Amino acid sequence: MIRTLVVDDDYRVAKVHADSVGRVEGFVSVGQAHSCEEARTMVQALQPDLLLLDLYLPDGHGLDLLRSLGELTLDPRPDFIVITAARDIASVRSAMQLGAMYYLVKPFGFGQLREQLVAYRQLHDGLGEHAVANQQTVDALYGLLRGPVARIADSRRMPPTMAGVLDIVRAADPDVSAADVAERVGVSRATAQRYLADMLRRGLVELVLNYGSKGRPEHRYRVKRPA
């Protein structure tokens, strides 16, 4: 389970977010903090995997809180998703520089939060499966977080080759490799892989790792399933 700490100065909002976390498979809310000081204490005591972090806190800024976590004995330091009303680009840029998994601007619905939590869970699980990563694996892992941002579900709006690749993945039972796609579309494997990587980033397909009897796992693809 991914142990999640909600940090928000509004007690009601914090409870809503904590309840939302509990509704997503693979997550558990371990607590709610309402100030920087309380959050630091709870992070030290609970060692959460993930913070849902508001930026406007009564005794400081959420990003300053993150910087101060370096003073604590944490192994590793928790990941974080920003949940805030702050819309200024400076805050967005600073959050990105500090390693934010995502930046959700209030108000947002449960569906948006669930989408990002599922993407984070997939990344979290994927990182745990690899001791060493090649570029293809790195691209796939980064694509897990980027996927929900820019989905294009209608193949009629895509370039013809991409639409053909997506149609083959849709028809696959249960999944398909880049080599299979290349053969059926009539393009090189590298071209098929490039389109598959792009669709992975868009959130149209998802990566399936097929572990054989030996060697590195085969990368296969299937249509993105609902969370």
Image (cartoon, rainbow, N blue to C red):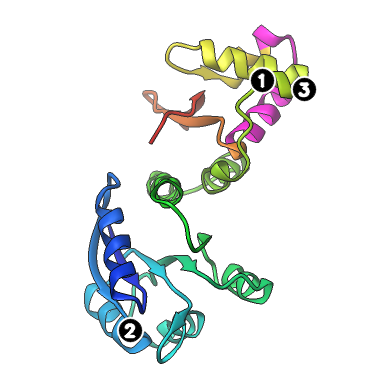
| Residue 62 shown in magenta | no
Give the label on residue 22, or none.
none
Task: Give the secondary structure at mark 3.
Answer: loop
Rendering coords of residue 35 (x, y %) = 35, 85
The secondary structure that most of the magenta stretch takes on is helix
As shown in the figure, which amino acid type bears the numbered disc 1? Answer: Ser
Q: What separation in Å lies between label 1 and label 2 (alpha carbons)? A: 47 Å
Residue 36 lies in quadrant: bottom left
Q: Looking at the image, which is closer to me, 81 or 216?
A: 81
Q: Which residue is mark 2?
A: 40
User: Is 203 situated above or below 46?
Assistant: above
For the magenta stretch, what is the residue range?
Answer: 183-200
Callout 2 crowding tier (Cα within 10 Å): few <14, some 14–19, many ≥20: some
Q: Residues within 10 Å of mark 3 (few under 14, many from 20)?
A: few
Q: Position of residue 158 (x, y in %)?
A: 73, 24
Residue in the foreground of this view, choosing between 24 and 9: 9
Disc 1, SS: helix
The quadrant in which the C terminus is found is: top left
**Residue under pointer 3:** 159
Q: CA distance from mark 3 to mark 1?
A: 8 Å
